Image (spheres, helix red, strand yellow):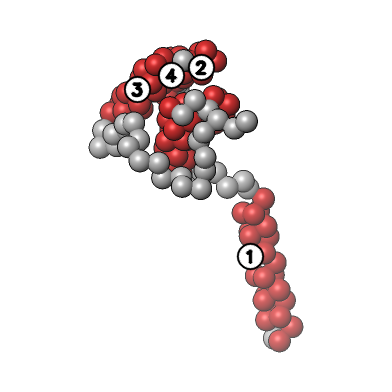
Amino acid sequence: MKIFALFLAVAVFLAVAKGHAEDAAEPNEPNIGDIMAHQQQRHIKLWFAGHGGNWPLADFEIDKLRDGFDDVNRLIGGDTVNKTVGAALIALEKAVEAKDREAFARSFDDLSAGCNACHRMLDHAFIAIQRPTAQPFADQSFAPQK
């Protein structure tokens, strides 16, 4: 009886360990909320980078926003995000390339409007994006680097 109990305990332990190993092998898939929290940070950083004329940082943030929007599209299916913000991202890229602050500001506002349109389409109109009014990243300089 003791040998059977020991055998049963070892079998249960191995089954549980195998289950944990399989769980660990699967990548941790972020949820849309996690992705969108990062998107909001990138949106804020993009504004301060472009507004301050730090074009390499603005370009970097646009690329990261595009990556995040691609992830959201993949998770929700379809092309919803690209339909609402795709044109604004292209316009932002052109404004950054031209180092045109006025075009940047217009395109940034178009991006924000596209975000809000997407939120409305997905029944999340209570999430309203706008130009940031304060810089929450006190540890980062948004001035162009020499």
Marks 4 and 1 sit apart, C-alpha to C-alpha, by 58 Å
Q: Nearer the viewer, residue 113 or 71?
A: 113
Residue at x 46% of width, y 18% of height: 92
Q: Position of residue 73 (x, y in %)?
A: 47, 28
Asked if the residues shown at circle 4 and circle 2 are in contact, with their CB atoms under 8 angstroms apart, the answer is yes
Label pair 4/1, CB-CB below 8 angstroms:
no
Q: Residue furthest bottom?
A: 2
Q: Name the residue tied to disc 2.
A: 99
Closer to the chain start, of discs 4 and 1, is 1
How crowded pointer 4 is (Cα within 10 Å; few <14, some 14-19, many 20+) is rated as some
- Sequence-first tag of 2 and 1: 1
Tell which circle, 4 or 3, labels the residue nearer the N-terminal end: 4
Point out the frontmost of discs 2 and 3.
2
- Mark 1 Cα-neighbour bin, 10 Å: few <14, some 14–19, many ≥20: few
Percent x, y for residue 144?
55, 30
Asked if residue 84 shows in the view, the reply is: no
